[in-house]
Image (cartoon, rainbow, N blue to C red):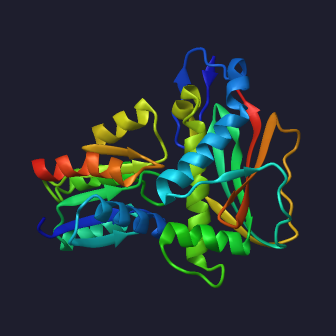
Amino acid sequence: MSEVRILIVDDSSVMRKIVERALRQAGLDPLVVHEAGSGIEGLELLRVKQVELIVSDINMPSMDGLEFLRQIKAQNLAPGVPVVMITTESSEEHVKQAILAGAQGYIRKPFTAEQVKERVLPLLKAA
Amino acid sequence: MIARMRGGAKEQEGTLSLRDSIHLISDPKNLDASVDEAFRMMLGVECQREVEPSAMESEQVTAVVGFGGVLSGACVVRSGNSAAMKIAAAMADMEFTEVDDIVKDAIGEMCNILAGAWKGKVPDLAANCGLSVPAVITGRDYHLHVQAPEFRLVHSYRFDDASFEVTIVCDGIQ
């Protein structure tokens, strides 16, 4: 697989590492990872970096993942780039909110690398 | 009845009483299953429940994630410093010699995952109970006190030679 550039947005640096590891285990290697600790940082990175996939947490202080998604759309950043939300929130309502905000995929924590592979690879192929 | 939600959950109209299903919410098996899921799926390690917990180091790390909405309370993960560093090492794939910000972040995140997995076991909770961002406390000789809780589950677990304790405390239910 050719190099894949990914933006991981999560206020937990440990969670960003776990997501990166799961993506590599899913076969996304070589991988170029840009990390952001908040939605605001994520938006700043998207203004200067090109990525093929965005993976974001939902529950974050200052700007949550749903607002981050809305801002990506409103500012027309990363058009056509799939966004996958990774979160502890698992109800249908939360999934619906994420999809309405512009997410194409949803992964509930805890997750396995296999689940990441099943949800992420088809999005990358389709993009 | 109108159930008022905190923690990002929405106000919802209609009859909603978790009291009727308190036996499901307070089922200790849900906590064991959540811990097992979190450690097996995220870290690839098995956790054993400790019926007779070993004494914990006096220097400790405690993470708290609050529940708000139809249920108020908290999920608390507490461990000695060395166990916290072992859990963080498994999560971050790094070695630690002190409880630094990454270790605190890891224990907070583990608490967040456990809180989400636990509330996800009961559909009404999954949909109508919000989670706070984790708070992490370090130090020695502190005690978490909740006035007259509705219920409290306190279980100890071990993975490898690291012992830790998980508490679910509920102080309000609608």
> Measuring 60% from the left and 67% from the top, which residue is drawn there?
B87
Image coordinates of residue A30 in percent, x first then y, are 20, 72
> How many numbered tags mark residues here?
0
Name the residue furthest bottom: B97
Q: Nearer the viewer, residue B103 or A96?
A: B103
Q: Nearer the viewer, residue B172 or A70?
A: B172
Q: Which quarter of the rendering shows the C terminus of chain B?
A: top right
Q: Is residue A29 above or below residue B117?
A: below
Image coordinates of residue A97 in percent, x first then y, are 36, 37
> Measuring 55% from the left and 75% from the top, which residue is drawn there?
B102
Asked if residue B150 lies left or right of residue B113, the reply is: right
Residue B95 found in image quarter: bottom right
> Measuring 46% from the left and 49% from the top, which residue is drawn there?
A109
Q: Is residue B167 above or below residue A60?
A: above
Image coordinates of residue B132 in percent, x first then y, are 59, 51
Asked if residue A46 lies left or right of residue B97, the reply is: left
Q: Is residue A74 above or below residue B149?
A: below
Q: Which quarter of the rendering shows the N terminus of chain B?
A: top right
Q: Is residue A59 above or below residue A27?
A: above
Asked if residue A77 lies left or right of residue B137, the reply is: left
The answer to whether one can see residue A127 in this image is no
Residue A8 found in image quarter: bottom left
Residue A105 found in image quarter: top left
The answer to whether one can see residue B124 in this image is yes
> Measuring 22% from the left and 59% from the top, which residue is drawn there?
A53
